[in-house]
Image (cartoon, rainbow, N blue to C red):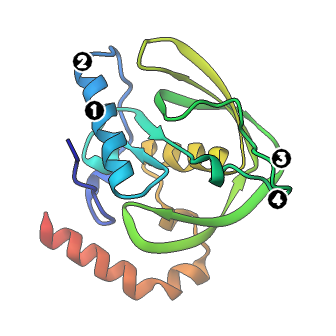
Amino acid sequence: MSLTICTYGNPILRKKAEEVTEITGEIHELAKDMLETMYEERGVGLAAEQVGRSERMFVIDIPPDSDMGDDGVRENPDVEMPLVFINPKITAHTEDIQVGPEGCLSFPEIFANVERWYEVDAEYTDLEGHVKQLHAKGLLARAVQHELDHLNGVLLVDRMSHVKKVALGGKLKRLVKETKKAL
């Protein structure tokens, strides 16, 4: 079942997610619905808060043709998609920073350049209850960091430059107004 995306201005986007203590049928159903919603909205990641839920989980699916480095070689060829991250955390990262454009389903048609670590190591629990380790590069690393931000109440607007915020001020205010009107 497709879920409704919460847009900027919805208070749930600022809440810190709650640890998942048990992987139930409801968690499996939520993961399935989040993936379906993400695909319908043409996203590459989606956090539970973005669909009005408080569980500490997100989903990611990076298409192979988007997983390319500057040299044209896949950056994460051994990572099977889609991924469901439950109670994720970043355990290590490189000092290399990548600056690149980011969008967010909670900020429709708004994009900004954001600094992220180029490589991260993450630990998470999968839907079978197994603790997993992941080494991610490039867009996958960016997506993990972006979705983890959501679980901590940090949004795209918090990561963009002051100049970009000013430039997008009108769009951001309209989005908040539309969101609050719909609530």
Q: Earlier in the sequence, mark 2 or mark 3?
A: 2
Q: Which residue is mark 4?
A: 70
Q: Nearer the viewer, mark 1 or mark 3?
A: 1
Amino acid type at image mark 4: Asp
Q: Amino acid at mark 3?
A: Glu
Q: Earlier in the sequence, mark 4 or mark 3?
A: 4
Badge 1, how many Cα within 10 Å: few under 14, some, many 20+? Answer: many
The amino acid type, in three-letter code, at marker 1 is Leu
- Frontmost residue, 91 versus 82: 82
Q: Which residue is mark 3?
A: 95
- Disc ID at residue 30: 1
Q: Nearer the viewer, mark 4 or mark 1?
A: 4
CB of mark 2 within 8 Å of CB of mark 3? no
| Mark 4 neighbour class, 10 Å CA radius: few under 14, some 14 to 19, many 20 or more | few
Mark 2 and mark 1 lie on one chain; the one further toward the N terminus is 2
Q: Position of residue 77 (x, y in %)?
A: 71, 36
Q: What's the distance in space between the residues labelled 4 and 1, CA to CA?
A: 35 Å
Query: Would residue 149 be seen by someone viewing this image from the given angle?
Result: yes
Between residue 17 and residue 46, name the one nearer to us: 46
Where on the picture, by quarter, is residue 120? Answer: top right
Mark-to-mark CA distance, 2 and 1: 9 Å
**Residue at horizontal 25 percent and vertical 28 percent from the top:** 29
Note whether 161 is above or below 26 in the view shown: below
Instruction: Check residue 130 in the rendering and tell me which mark sits there, or answer none.
Output: none
Query: Which of pointers 2 and 3 indicates the residue nearer the eye?
Result: 2
